[in-house]
């Protein structure tokens, strides 16, 4: 996931806030939407690198 965004953009504080927001939304919706449940593992891995 983190490879999709260039480091100069990804390392900005507002980018980190945006990524954390999206990750939180995926976790909140994973019980309601099967496709989000499938993403949860990859999101957890991504969070370990933030």
Image: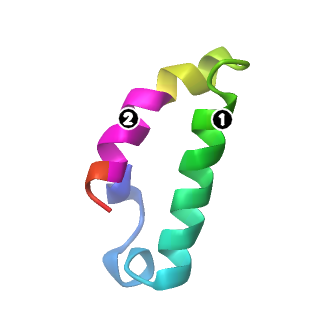
Residue 12 location (% of width, % of height) = 44, 84
Q: Is residue 27 magenta?
A: no
| Vertical relation: 1 (above or below) 29 | below
Q: Nearer the viewer, residue 30 or 1?
A: 30
Q: Nearer the viewer, mark 2 or mark 1?
A: 1
Is disc 1 placed on a helix, strand or loop? Answer: helix
Residue 35 location (% of width, % of height) = 61, 21
Residue at image coords 37%, 79% = 11
Is disc 2 placed on a helix, strand or loop? Answer: helix
| Vertical relation: 32 (above or below) 43 | above
For the C terminus, the image quarter is bottom left
Residue placed farthest to the left in the image? 49
Q: Nearer the viewer, residue 13 or 9?
A: 13
Crowd band around label 2 with a 10 angstrom C-alpha radius: few (<14), some (14–19), many (20+): few
Q: Which residues are magenta?
A: 40-47
The numbered disc on residue 28 is 1
Q: CA distance from mark 2 to mark 1?
A: 15 Å
Residue 5 location (% of width, % of height) = 42, 66
Residue at image coords 64%, 15% = 34
The residue identified by callout 2 is: 42
| Vertical relation: 19 (above or below) 45 | below
Residue at image coords 37%, 73% = 6
């Amino acid at each position: 996931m983190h490879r999709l965004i260039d480091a100069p953009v990804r390392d900005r504080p507002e980018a980190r806030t945006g990524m954390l927001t999206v990750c939180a939304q995926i976790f909140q919706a994973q019980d309601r939407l099967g496709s989000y449940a499938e993403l949860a593992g990859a999101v957890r891995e991504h969070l370990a690198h933030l």
